[in-house]
Amino acid sequence: MPKPRTYFVCNECGAESPQWFGKCPACGTYNSLEEQITSTTLGTLPTRGVSWQQTPQSNGKSIAKAAKPRASLTFDQISDRQVSRWCSGYDELDRVLGGGIVPGSMVLIGGDPGIGKSTLLLQVSNQLAQNYRILYVCGEESGQQVKLRASRLGVSKFQNPIEESDPQLQNQSPNGHLVNNGSARADLYVLPETDLEEILREVDSLKPNVAVIDSIQTVYFPALTSAPGSVAQVRECTSALMQVAKREDITMLIVGHVTKEGAIAGPKVLEHLVDTVLYFEGDRFASHRLLRTVKNRFGATHEIGIFEMIDRGLREVANPSELFLGSRDDPSPGTAIVVACEGTRPIVVELQALVSPTSYASPRRSTTGIDYSRLLQILAVLEKRVGIPLSKLDAYVASAGGLSVEEPAVDLGVAIAVVASFRDRIVDQRTVLIGEVGLGGQVRPVSQMELRLKEAAKLGFKRAIVPKGQPYPDVDLEIIPVAKVLDAIIAAIPPQSFPDLDLEEE
């Protein structure tokens, strides 16, 4: 009997170490190493491409025999089966997934506690249950709690109620946890369970089209001695679910907890195993929620879907620009309108800036939704190339609604908002600003200009200040190309509104 081997695994990056350290040697995280015990059994090691056998001519000695490929196929031998995506019932989720749910795929959804992950998946399960068989595995709630939440969300109100005369549909589910008495869909089953073996048996018996696991940190494999949520448990449970999903062509929607830094808890291999990784973001005290994709094997990354939390659950936001666009009827100094692109989706956002004298030796810089390093760079350009003394002033910049807009295309809007706040002027509310600010004070071209200008024209804007030399489409907008930040300031804040300002002399 081989001696069990003890090693330590980092619960942040998944790196293994032969001994315990206070800090992980790979990622540098403190107190993240957890002890794991395994036993190595001889005879289970795979061969390295060479098979050994004894023949009569070998006099009892093993000789090497070349292994022949049996399972590998060429591209010509692989069938060209077209995979049709399933509609989830929510256009925003379909957009993020790249056009719908791919059968047999594995989707991981992470987010802060209370952000609405379980609410979203329960509503999606309700929509999919109209055409497919759904298994909802809840490891954090009982069946009664899930039913109570479903009643609040209106999930139990369905179009085709279960007839009381049908005894097959009135009986309990195979595990005896949920009684289907006509208040839930016939094709939506709930399984309050955390044992991986029980979950796999239920999947094998029910044969669902979609299985929802809420959450993967609560599922445990009894053969492992580590606690649920540990690195070994999360890795083994996810691997087992992935094998079932690929073998049985079952779509898996998995909820993952996040750490205090915002990353999905568990080993990084968890994100490598799944096909799609989605993050549910937003301020839990605000109404809007952002569903952002960071990995997608079947579509583009960095797409976003926008939802609004109401008393009946999550509701799609058809026009997100209105959500992140402030009121243009009552403009205030220090605001500018930009058009940001999240994936292939243009969003019009209002930026707000406040510049005031500092009370400290070092001026304060604060951002909300804007990259902090980009703000420091823009402030340095305004002071060096334009002559505005910002090194002795506090600067605060925020995006309306707290939307994270960190792409360089919003640099020009940040610069104009800061200058407008410094001079206490109002930027024309019918003007949008698009462009990247270079260190030399120049306005550089940006990508997806056509999408940005069409979105601005659709919302009724009249002017657009864009980088000079970049082609733009024929839209119902007055296009003002600029080459320098100073030219953009003069175009956005006309000199007649502050005749005493001479930016060249400052």
Image (cartoon, rainbow, N blue to C red):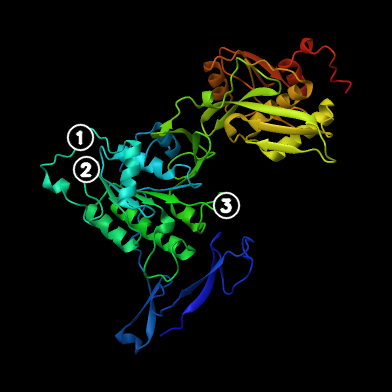
Where is residue 20, by image quadrant?
bottom right
Of residues 333 and 2, the one drawn nearer to the viewer in this rendering: 333
- Report if the CB atoms under discs 3 and 1 are less than 8 Å apart: no
- Report if the CB atoms under discs 2 and 3 are less than 8 Å apart: no
> In the rendered image of this protein, does residue 496 appear above or below residue 235?
above
Residue at (29, 61) in percent of width and height: 198
Task: Check residue 260 in the rendering and tell me which mark sits there, or answer none.
Answer: 3
Of residues 474 and 49, the one drawn nearer to the viewer in this rendering: 474
Amino acid type, residue under disc 3 in the picture: Lys
Badge 3 density bin: few <14, some 14–19, many ≥20, Cα 10 Å: few
**Residue 506 placement, left or right of 115:** right
Instruction: State how far apart marks 1 and 2 are (Cα).
Output: 9 Å
Amino acid type, residue under disc 1 in the picture: Asn
Where is residue 122, by image quadrant?
top left
The residue under label 1 is 160
- Report if the CB atoms under discs 1 and 2 are less than 8 Å apart: yes
Q: Secondary structure at mark 2?
A: loop
